Image: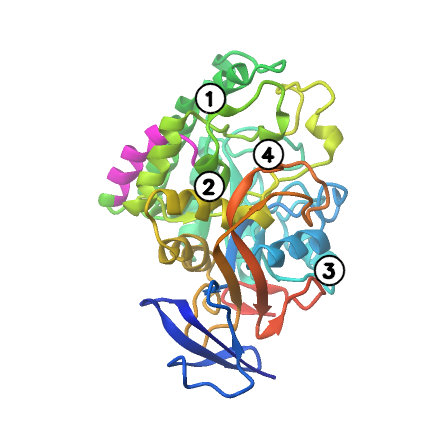
Amino acid sequence: MSLVVRARRVVLPEGERAAAVHSEDGRITAVTAFDDAPAAAVTLADDEVLLPGLVDSHVHVNEPGRTEWEGFASATRAAVAGGVTAIVDMPLNSIPPTTTVDALHVKRSAAKGQVAADVAFWGGAVPGNVDQLRALHEAGVVGFKCFLLDSGVPEFPPLDPAGLRAALTELATFEGLLIAHAEDADVIAAAPEAGGPDYAGFLASRPGAAEETAIGGLIAAARATGARAHVVHLADGDALPMLRRARAEGVRITVETCPHYLTFAAEQVPDGATAFKCCPPIREATHREALWAALRDRDIDLVVSDHSPCTPELKRLDVGDFGLAWGGIASLQVALPAVWTGARDRGAALTDVVRWMAEAPARLAGLPRKGAIAVGRDADLVAFAPDERFTVGRLHHRNPVTPYAGRELTGVVRRTWLRGQLADGSPIGRLMGRGMPE
């Protein structure tokens, strides 16, 4: 199967230019001049830009075990509709969690045959499974997720400081990667308890100091062990100076943030609007702008969705109680336009968005055939109309609850190709292991 797509604007690793992208059997074979294309080439419209397929390395699919929250079929349909051609599934919220090789086999069996995008998997680091980490690594997980406080589900308990050091020490022996939900339990225990519809009260219950304390501990453990570590979903701009210093000192730590932290601000969250609840929480506008500045300065490496949906009942929309509601934001399908809307308003370019949302997540997850339009990469391509505006309506996510509902965004995904094949939501995706597809 061959495909040639050409456009007046193509985002390539070296920058944006007119080009024709040639592929055979799902792999890019050449990137040539715009006019160097056969008559059968697909030519994008003048208002479209050709992007590489995005990689979302932070997605909670929840199947098996909590498939009523989200499943592989619905999540990957949403992904390709939003220009995301590869996702990496988180190890928790599904039952069993992906903390053993046997559990990984269960997860892969559940996904097989129903994915519309390519899918890789994180393993989990929990108390008592240090002896499983190398085996999971060899079985193909891209790295290991841990929590430094209660995860919200009993089958995925957090690591204490000794457990964190033990996991990092083991991972350092085979260059494994630990990604951490970094909030400190003691800081949160000392904060006011969340409850009721008041968003300011919920925000006070998860103070920025909880992120800063936990990140400080993660930096110290990574420095002591020499292991690779990564901070997921950074919301607190005040943690950036310590991360910047650690990186300058050679600590191997990377950082991500999410579209909701770049889009929303605490001052704008209505009381009782539990669709906005996530952990760590959406903070004030000063933090949002600090995150944007850190992306510009390359102190934050990537932007991924942290798509973490649940049923409408668990969001407690009936009472609007932030203390009772499940914390998680559904955004997989709208991540690209949400980020692009904010990026263009701040003078960033599509080349920046591709670096944050395709190149860097692919590199983090060890997926060398994803994330760029280049010879040898998978022919994962997106026709994106960057100037078209739309209002967020019904999405492909299994459940309709999202804080983006009714919001006007800029940038429309018109077509997506997965390994050279038009991605229309049918199950053409593959399951991937670290470094290679199945």
Query: Is residue 238 on the magenta stretch?
Result: yes
* Circle number at residue 403: 4
- Residue 257, position as x, y percentages in the image: 44, 41
* Circle number at residue 228: none
Q: Marks 4 and 1: in contact by CB < 8 Å?
A: no
Residue that carries the numbered disc 3 in the rendered image: 109
Quarter of the image with the N terminus is: bottom right
- Residue 76, position as x, y percentages in the image: 65, 56
Q: Residue at x 29, y 34 (%)?
A: 242
Q: Residue at x 41, y 73 (%)?
A: 374
Residue that carries the numbered disc 1 in the rendered image: 267
Which span of residues is magenta-colored? Answer: 233-247
- Cα distance between the residues tagged 1 and 2: 23 Å
Amino acid under disc 1:
Glu
Amino acid under disc 2:
Val
- Decide which of tag 1 and tag 3 comes sooner along the chain: 3
Residue 3, image quadrant:
bottom right
Query: Is residue 126 on the magenta stretch?
Result: no
